[in-house]
Amino acid sequence: MSDEQKAVFGSWIQAIGTITAAVGSTPSNVLTDQQLENLNLIGNVLQATGNAILADMEDSLTLNKIGNMLQAIGNSTVVTSIIIDFNERTKQLLEIQGNLLQATGGGVALADAYEQEKSIEQMYSIYGNLLQVIGNSMQALAGSMELKGEDPGNINVAGSWIQAIGSVISAIGETKYS
């Protein structure tokens, strides 16, 4: 598989993961809480896998590679919060930290895209990463509010879907220009 094919594959695995996690974060009258949690788990595993593939395809240490590595670590942290039987506070802290790591990784990747020569391809990357950073930050904010006993409303759901839209934009750009 060529590097271009790996980039497209990894981008779409990540995008499918963000959409799956967003569905899992959206309240439902049809799905049970356990089914929603399972979708969130599967989505974060797919995101971590996609980000790891994207990081692995780059031979040299670039900001983009570091950003993808941080995002994969962030997703893995969220996965840990779901699968290990910690107390509720620890689970919330891990989820917040995982979302902040993802936002940081997206910001690092955004900086790399911003440094590149401006092109339509780079615009997909810039806007896609920016939306992912905003979405992850909103999810971390919602988690912090919950931890303090405040009602975050739909901030987490909106953040999840904003992140998903950003990852799809990035995947479209990767597909269109690879």
Image (cartoon, grey):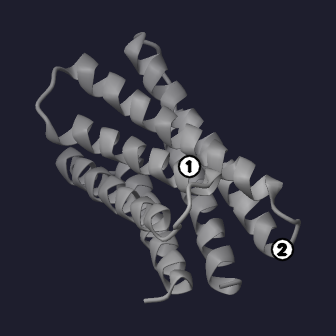
| Res 38 seen here | yes
For the point 64% across and 67% down, the residue is 170
Query: The N terminus appears in which quarter of the rendering?
Result: bottom left
Q: Position of residue 115 (x, y in %)?
A: 81, 54
Q: Is residue 74 above or below residue 13?
A: above
Query: Left or right: 122 with respect to 89?
Result: right
| Res 27 seen here | no
Q: Residue furthest left?
A: 85
Query: Toward which corner of the image does residue 50 lie, by quadrant?
Result: bottom left
Query: The C terminus appears in which quarter of the rendering?
Result: bottom right
Q: Which residue is mark 2?
A: 120
Q: Is residue 33 above or below residue 147?
A: below
Q: Position of residue 164 (x, y in %)?
A: 54, 58
Disc 2 and disc 1: Cα gap in Å?
A: 21 Å
Residue toward you, 125 or 40: 125
Residue 67: image tag: 1
Q: What is the three-letter code of the residue carrying label 1? A: Gly
Q: What is the three-letter code of the residue carrying label 2? A: Ile
Q: Position of residue 52 (x, y in %)?
A: 40, 60
- The tag earlier along the polypeptide, 2 or 1, is 1
For the point 41% across and 20% down, the residue is 146
Q: Position of residue 126 (x, y in %)?
A: 75, 57
Residue toward you, 18 or 59: 59
Q: Is there a contact, CB below 8 Å, between mark 2 and mark 1? A: no
Query: Toward which corner of the image does residue 42 lie, by quadrant?
Result: bottom left
